[in-house]
Image (cartoon, rainbow, N blue to C red):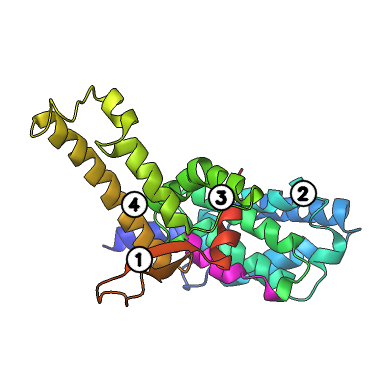
Amino acid sequence: MNKILKKIKDVIGINKRGVSVMKSVAFTAIDAIATNIDNSMYQGQPVMTSAISLAKGLYGAALEMRKDRVKEFINLIQENPNIFIKEVVGQKGFTDAFVITLEKYIRERNSEKRTIIKKVFIGFASSKDMDSFQLERLENTITNISLATIRFLGFINDKIQPIVNDLINKNKNYEPLSKHIERWLHEEYDPNSKKVQTRHNYDSKRDTGTDKLDKIYKIKKEIEVGINDAVAELIGLGIFRPIVEGGGTLGGGGSTLEYSFTSFGDQFMSYLRD
């Protein structure tokens, strides 16, 4: 047990007195990047060095253990000089936002989600009103959303949204998002769809009651379950807004549950696109 504890202390940099010791090699490299950014972008003013110093004070051991991710995130500033201009980074609250986002970034184990975090932070820096920008909410949503649901949103963006946008341009879109997804589901997976019948060589008169029909319904059911799970998650995250149609009450009969994006959902979606 003592050997294990010693190894842990060596990794995070704790000396014999129990005091956290920041490993110089890793932080020297990080500090050098921060200093270079300050010199090249901010006329030597300690913008990045101050932010990194604050982050080291709050998350020292975590920064040490995820030094490569720290470098990735700091490089985001250097790679976008037209966004992270002096007037932006000099605003009240920017350093706090940087440190909060850095902590989210280094703790996120999924690379796809880390990419989204960087996009959100660029959106924050590009915002005309940083105070009202929903940075923490967006980043918490990235943490909590499942990868399967991110894939579902990607499907909506690639397959459904172009149809919706085309109807909007023609002033013909008056339906919730769910209606468009239902039509797609029917066309791609329902046995009454001509496309499905061709794909599976299915004839409604010849193959009714056969294993072929059972297979088609099984595939459709699997897709429906995946969609329903994602929709429930998105409603809980505030990305979808439930809409009760049909004149009844939800759960009381005579009504159907439809859904569309909330304004927050539209904002979140914008950071999933390339």
Mark 3 and mark 4: Cα distance apart in space: 18 Å
Q: Is residue 61 visible?
A: no
In the depicted structure, whether residue 1 falls above or below residue 199: below
| Pointer 3 residue | 272
Sooner in the amino-acid sequence: mark 1 or mark 4: 4
CB under 8 Å between callouts 3 and 4?
no
**Magenta residue check for 47:** no
Of residue 204 and residue 73, the one placed in the foreground of this image is 204
Mark 4 and mark 2: Cα distance apart in space: 37 Å
Which residue is the extreme one toward the front?
205
Disc 3 crowd rating (10 Å Cα; few below 14, some 14-19, many 20+) is some
Mark 3 and mark 2: Cα distance apart in space: 19 Å
| Pointer 2 residue | 80
CB under 8 Å between callouts 3 and 2?
no
* Secondary structure state at the residue bearing disc 2: loop
Mark 1 residue type: Leu
| Pointer 1 residue | 257
| Pointer 4 residue | 227
Disc 4 crowd rating (10 Å Cα; few below 14, some 14-19, many 20+) is some
Q: Which residues are magenta?
A: 132-142
Query: Residue at point 48% right, 61% down?
Result: 260
Say which quadrant the C terminus sits in. Answer: top right
- Position of 183 with respect to 168 (left or right) is left
Residue 224 x, y percent position in the rendering = 28, 49
Of residue 179 and residue 153, the one placed in the foreground of this image is 179
* Secondary structure state at the residue bearing disc 4: helix
In front of the other: label 3 or label 4?
4
